[in-house]
Amino acid sequence: MNILILGSGGREHAFAWKIAQSPLCDTLFMAPGNAGTASVATNLSISYNDFDSIANAVIENSIELVIVGPEEPLVNGVVDYFGGREDLAKVRIIGPDKAGAQLEGSKDFSKQFMQKYGIPTAASRTFTANELAIGLEYLENHSLPIVLKADGLAAGKGVIIAEKHSEAIQAFKEMLVDGKFGKAGNKVVVEQFLKGIELSVFVLSDGEHYKILPEAKDYKRIGESDTGLNTGGMGAVSPVTFADANFIRKVEEKVVKPTLHGLQSEGIKYVGFIFIGLMNIKGEPYVIEYNVRMGDPETEVVIPRIQSDFAMLMASTAKGTLHDFELQISPQVAVTTVVVSGGYPEDYEKGKVISGTDKVEDVHVFHAGTTFNGNAEVVTNGGRVMALTGLANSLENAVHKSQRAAQVVQYEGKYFRHDIGVDLIRYND
Ligand code: AMP
Ligand code: GLY
């Protein structure tokens, strides 16, 4: 089978690396991919939002299975587009349709969904620009901190945690009146602050059955000890020490099952990944958010722990036979450290030559923001440059392997966090 993966990040390189190992995969294509995916797949220079060009490439290359990495094409309706083309009727696509993608594409939709199906989440209220006055009054009386969320996709910047009422009021007006996030901020969800430990649980659904994939913890802030600006993710760990079998069972009963039941009740046939961002509050799960894709860099620790054939897992998802699939997970610990461009998540330079990737030992190197320059050298091409995943029998050793590789990889302006996974080592003690 010929397979196409849409996307260009570390998540997609991890998918590609795993799928390329499968005897089920003949030729693997990426749209657009990165310098790392070029070593395991054929990169097509097509944007993942250009549905016509994707369709042409699918036909031209006899692609039978498409895996959608990022949320944007899903929210934009790539699955509905494929469904609407007769010449693509036989092509299977992993990802929810536009209706299902609202779980991530609209925070208001996902909050209403959780309320309707009894899924534990923070109490919230949604406001539009017409409700400015009552919204402001509501904020004045809200306990601190106050969480404000732009309804639509805002490139990971749409969540504000205000420590003061004045801050919340300003952010609220910026979204609803000044259009700070464009259309994404036409509605604002105001929500109670949840205090606990955060983790992510990943579910794969074939529309009827599901599998729970390994859970992960992400490190979102740029600075060590979780300080400074939010990023796409500076590292990840799987498994998560504080998510024992009992907690995961609670997540399955209180969150996963009602979510899939809710989707079916809404008439949504959800084929794809569901990323459930959770807060563990004294052993009880609360949903912070849904994403309709895998996490990045969480995928870079989840995929190395999956021992089963991933192309077969995807084919089984597409066919609706996940209940027959035996998912084998490694008990080993995976830790990934992301090396980023100097200045990220604010402005940064691109085009820095990367060296040292041939010298790293005993890690998986997943490229993210990389490309080739005119001299065929691998250069930086994004904020997050690479994710370096160590796999070991202990958390300490996995941290060590990942950190050592992050030291060895070199380019001008390189930065990484030295504390990925370290808090969990302490947690173990
Ligand atoms: P998001 O952009 O939806 O991933 O949210 C960014 C981050 O904001 C989350 O990963 C949480 O750390 C935090 N967050 C979102 N909602 C809440 C909440 N209700 N209580 C506490 N923290 C939250
Ligand atoms: N690492 C967080 C995300 O993928 O949204």
Image (spheres, helix red, strand yellow):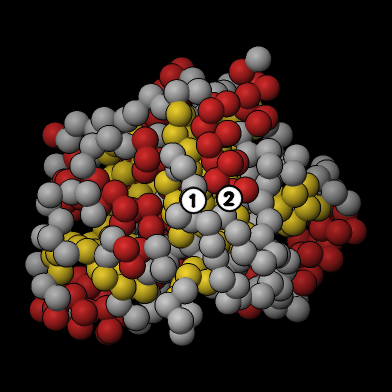
Image quarter of the N terminus? bottom left
Residue at image location 34% in from the left, 81% down from the top: 45
Left or right side of 276 for 122: right
SS at badge 1: loop
Within-10-Å neighbours for mark 1: few <14, some 14–19, many 20+: few
Q: Which mark is residue 359?
A: 1
SS at badge 2: helix
Task: Return the x and y of residue 53 as percentages of the image width and height.
Answer: 28, 84
Q: Is residue 269 visible?
A: no
Residue at image location 32% in from the left, 30% down from the top: 329
Q: Is residue 103 above or below residue 153?
A: above
Left or right side of 424 for 160: right
Looking at this view, is 142 or 42 the one in front?
42
Q: Residue furthest top?
A: 429
Residue at image location 18% in from the left, 49% down from the top: 22
Residue at image location 65% in from the left, 21% down from the top: 427
Q: Is mark 1 within 8 Å of ligand 2?
A: no
In which quadrant of the rendered view does residue 385 lie?
Answer: bottom right
> Mark 2 sits on what residue?
408
